Amino acid sequence: MAGETISMTKLKQIFLHRRNGMALEAIARVMNVSRNTVKKYIRLAEQKGLELEQLAAMEEHDLEKIFAEPTSVGKSRFQDLEGMFAWMEQELKRTGVTRWLLWAEYKSRYPDGYAYTQFCDYYRHWLEHRSATMHFDHTPADKAYIDFTGKRLQVVDRDGGEVRDVEIYVCILGFSQLTYVEALNSQRKEDFLQATANSLKYFGGVPKALVTDNLKSAVTEPDNYEPEINESFLEFANHYQTTIYPARSRKPKDKALVESAVNIVYKRIFAPLRDKIFFELHELNSSILELLNKHNNEMFHKEPFSRRQKFEQHEAGLLQPLPATPYQLRKYKTARVMKNSHIQLEKHYYSVPYRFIGKDVKAIYTRDQVHIFINNERIAFHIRGYKPFGYTTDQNHLPSSHQFVADWKPEKFLSWADSIGPQVRTYIETILQQKKYPEQAYRSCVGILSLAKKAGKERLIKAIERATFYQIYNYKTVKKILDGGLEMLFEPDSDQSEASLPQHTNIRGKEHYQ
């Protein structure tokens, strides 16, 4: 198949754009792929009998099962040439550079490339398409425009008095001009995506497309013709069943509406707040929201209705519904399943079916959920856990020999120790308290308590009394006492109770075991 392979996140955007009626050439330009690639995947979908609406609703891992290719396919001759056009346009502005010269360089690089006439025809066609006039007739529920204001507002530290600049996010619906404004700590991806989710919640629905300036949080590689959209922003758009349309650099017509909105924000929000002091971001946003609602309810200068009235009468009902759950930023990690049938993600452990022990799996996780895959098949799902070095375990994932381990908790060991004697409980409790994380002491506890079956409860109690006297708390010490029969030589009520260990540089104190 001609064309290149792409990520499933991009592929879902292609299907969403096509569902909305966008032309193949326009999709290729927006998604920074060749027209042949767009055509290839749409044709593949048709061959498989899949509707665009159905494909747009699929999760990325389901799309990967259908469309993923084991190896990438080489670019066609036309794609090689097409990839040079943007560079050629810049080179032709340089003194003495002609199309004939660039064609000669092209042929030296691609000896089987096009002849000069075809070379020029394809380049001329590309120029005509690229410079075609874009129409901006705003239709209801079609586009929302996003940008940050150039100027910032401030929050003051209540204790130190330090003044901190905060970013101001603006999102406006093209048709009704209903506007959303929010103060953010930064323009980082996490803040940007959360603000965009908040703007859609404020509108109560989702437009067909989100038009952004070349923000770092939205666009990885700004470019006049082929901007590379941030993968997380693509996932965000897929979650809300909308598309992304980056504005072109230095093309004011692409973002005139939102730039006009920014100027209005300066007058109707910045100016009224100029002498007010805010100590918390939420305080500032509360004041912004009050002024914002006033702005949206105010009548247009030359129209007998407000932005809010125009929105509610002509646009609100046409927006796509919000998803059942808001978007959460996804993180990805490849991890190897350990011998205890768990993988580690950010200092927490999650179980995986034991048949995958020793294999590498792919984890996709959000603030609330963890999904674990192997070969595009989901093999485990968990609610996100945050306890450091804690375990989230589905006991069905463990072999029968490991089921006992899944129940390890401090309460289990204290109850077990109680059944032997109060001295044993105190000893086990101390071991658990000495470790920063109780899980680190579980194996020691199992080892010590298991000695009751081998040596008997009475001998274990005496061994623990001896170890406690010397304030040494670990499995090896108790076992050595029992192996040597030393517990029988220990009488805590005798004069020996007043004795202490001889001082020696080779003897480590209790601090070593903490």
Image (cartoon, grey):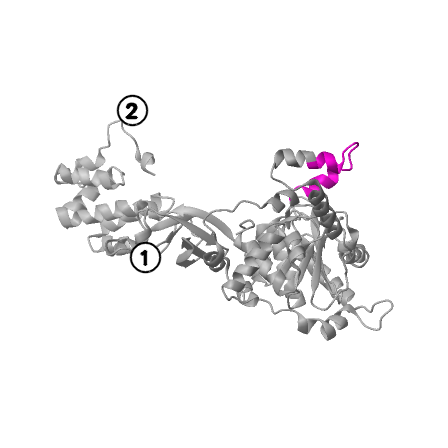
Circle number at residue 397: 1
Percent x, y of residue 107 = 65, 36
Q: Earlier in the sequence, mark 2 or mark 1?
A: 1
* Region rendered in magenta: 83-103
Say whether residue 99 is magenta: yes
Disc 2 residue type? Answer: Thr
Q: Residue furthest right?
A: 302
Work out how far the residue at label 2 is from the one at label 1, CA to CA, in angstroms.
49 Å
Q: Which quadrant would residue 380 be assigned to in this image?
A: bottom left
Percent x, y of residue 70 = 45, 49
Say whether residue 207 is magenta: no
375 relative position to 303: left or right:
left
Q: Is residue 346 visible?
A: no
Q: Residue at x 33, y 45 (%)?
A: 440
Percent x, y of residue 431 = 30, 45
Circle number at residue 217: none
- Out of 157 and 33, give the one closest to the viewer: 33
